[in-house]
Image (tube, rainbow, N blue to C red):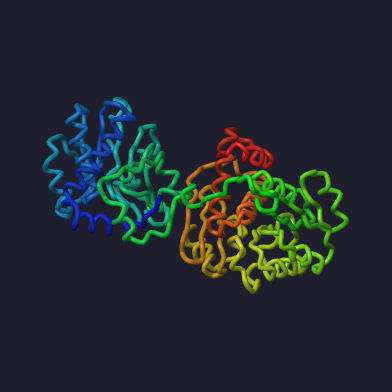
Amino acid sequence: MEILTAGQMRNADKETIANIMPELQLMENAGFAAACQIAHRYGKRPVTVLCGAGNNGGDGFVVARLLRQRGWPVEVVFTGDEQKMTPAAAANAKKFKGAVRPLSLQSLKRAEKDGRLFVDAVFGTGLSRPVTGDIADFFNALNETATPCVALDIPGGVCADTGEVLGTAPFCDMTVTFCRPKIGHFLYPARERAGDLVVCPIGIPDEIVAHQNPAVYENAPDLFSIPAATPYDNKYSRGAVLVRAGEMTGAARLAAAAARRAGAGWVGVSCDTRLQNLFALDAETVVQPADTAEAFKAQLSGRKISAAVIGMGLAETPRAREFLDILSASGKPFVADAGALPFIKTVKDPSRAIVTPHAGEFCRLFPDIAGKNKLDQARTAAKTLNCVVVLKGADTVIAAPDGRAAINATTAFNLATAGSGDVLGGIIGAMLAKSLPPFESACAGVWLHSRAAESVGRPNLTAPDIIDALGEIR
């Protein structure tokens, strides 16, 4: 699914209003969709709808009217300036025949007594300044209660394009957004405020969405196609991965095991001769000693090797840089992580590379862009390096040099464990070996990695647990 910026969504609204339906009908569709979701989730109860003066507030007035028609006890708290209401919001405010009150903390006190639900329709996706004053005080007070809150489109106080919280924002149980999700729904800290995300169609055609030229997507199987096994496969046609090991041998062993479990037909480990007995413990791994750069180059020259993985457990030394240069010159697609990352900027042609830094590694590699939001960080780095960047974390972003990006929507906090990144590198290596292009390989690897962790279903998983779970992902 495409993820839109606030500007793209506004343009899609305008094009729909110009060519498909009047603005009031589009607003009615949005309010109807949200009212249905609220009624389905919560059942009849007292509700307070917080409405601003913009079109998000207009959506809120529609929700208030429709829930009142269903017999819900509904009040509207108007938070804006009546003189600054948009025409569509003003029209729907007139249609609402229930109580409209000014903003007051008294409504929170009532909520604690009558099980009230709040609906946030204050700002919507157009907010670009910090939330201050009475509404900030109200959001802060709401967050100190157990009162449920539903946001329309995006929680008030969240920047739709960056995931920043501008001053403050409510912690919502659910966010009902329209047509397509927005960037702020997926990036932290805003993602934590959105709660469960529900995307509702409101009559904007897919063609109009396509006219906005979206380049950011929710990471999902629609973005990649992992080749299925056929009767004509052999171990090499399924993908052959070579892992270059470092001193910390456990990292390379995890990467190799993950590549095997992710479907590579052949996995080898290139290592110093003195370390080969440690890798020989894994019966499925082909151990290939290489003490010199020349020996490593010879290993890569074989036509059967289709992708490589480097950096896991590798010390940041001139030797690591030499091995990375050889790998880049080989023409093989590869994953670079950990000890290989500091040298990726000096590689002559990194276009076939996928780099997988976590936040700390990224800041050291790109201190000049570390202050931007995560999506911009990854996209800028991908363009600068001319390779795919996987910026890891709870909201992993995959970015390509051409501007395409995907944000991983599967939340698996239990991936914060030693060896998890090594496993991810091995999975992506297997995808590269199956001839998926770098961006698609990275998207597939990140998706499989997070789905495997999610399927384990327990908080304290270990890296081998992720590998074991890969075989169950379909």
Is any part of residue 166 visible from this angle?
no
Q: Is residue 314 above or below residue 99?
A: below
How far across and down, in percent of the image, does residue 260 sit?
69, 46
Q: Going 11% across and 43% down the picture, which residue do you hit?
A: 94
Q: Nearer the viewer, residue 50 or 256?
A: 256
Locate the C terminus and report the quarter of the image it occupies. top right
How far across and down, in percent of the image, does residue 287 sit?
81, 53
Q: Is residue 210 above or below residue 226?
A: below
Determine the residue located farthest toward the right in the rendered image.
274
209 left or right of 339?
Answer: left
Q: Nearer the viewer, residue 176 or 78?
A: 176
427 left or right of 326?
Answer: left
Q: Going 42% across and 54% down the picture, which residue do you hit?
A: 164
103 left or right of 192?
Answer: left
Q: Going 75% across and 60% down the picture, which residue do you hit?
A: 315
How far across and down, in percent of the image, does residue 353 sit?
61, 63
Q: Is residue 189 above or below residue 8?
A: above
